[in-house]
Amino acid sequence: MRPDNRLTDGAPMRPLACGRCAAEVLVRKSSWQQTSVQWDARATAACAERDPAGGAFEGCRSLRDTIREAALCGTLEVVDGGERSAGAAGRVPEHRA
């Protein structure tokens, strides 16, 4: 996987494996509201929530949960880690993976 170097204003993209299917993508959490995810062919094939026929894909809920947990635990840096803009019940807002 070739890293995306366009985002050099802070933390680089980091590998992260989905907690459900172990598909490994590159992730960068710019803020609590913005996440960049870079998929490669191997991760695309491994994702348990992607349609193997190539249908519409609106994001992987399992990967989204893995990213959120990594950010909350501090294993994934949030570049602009200011105040978390909590949604309902104090949760960090959703993002698409």
Image (spheres, rainbow, N blue to C red):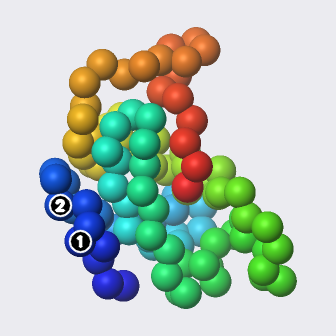
Q: Is residue 81 left or right of residue 39?
A: left
Residue drawn where x is 60% and y is 78% of the image: 44
Q: Quadrant of the N terminus?
A: bottom left
Helix, strand or loop at label 1? It is: loop
Q: Position of residue 75 (x, y in %)?
A: 27, 48
Could you say where residue 42 lies in the image, as x and y percent from the top left?
53, 86
Q: Indicate the position of residue 61 as horizontal and vertical percent values.
A: 65, 50
Direction from residue 31 to residue 61 in the image, left or right: right
What residue sits 49% from the left and 50% below the top? 66
In which quarter of the view is residue 94 placed?
Answer: top right
Front residue of 15/30: it is: 30
Asked whether the residues under the numbered discs 1 and 2 touch, taking CB atoms below 8 Å apart as contact, a structural biologist would say yes
Disc 1 designates what residue? 5
Residue 48 shows in the view = yes
Say which quarter of the image contains residue 32.
top left
Q: In this rendering, is residue 39 above or below 88?
A: below
Which amino acid is tagged 2?
Thr
| Residue depicted at 16% across the width and 51% down the height | 10
The CA span between labels 1 and 2 is 6 Å
In screen coordinates, is 52 left or right of 76? Answer: right
Task: Note whether 2 is above or below 17 in the view shown.
Answer: below
Q: What residue sits 58% from the left and 12% below the top? A: 89
Mark yes or no: residue 74 visible.
Answer: no
Residue annotated with mark 2: 8
Q: Nearer the viewer, residue 72 or 55?
A: 55
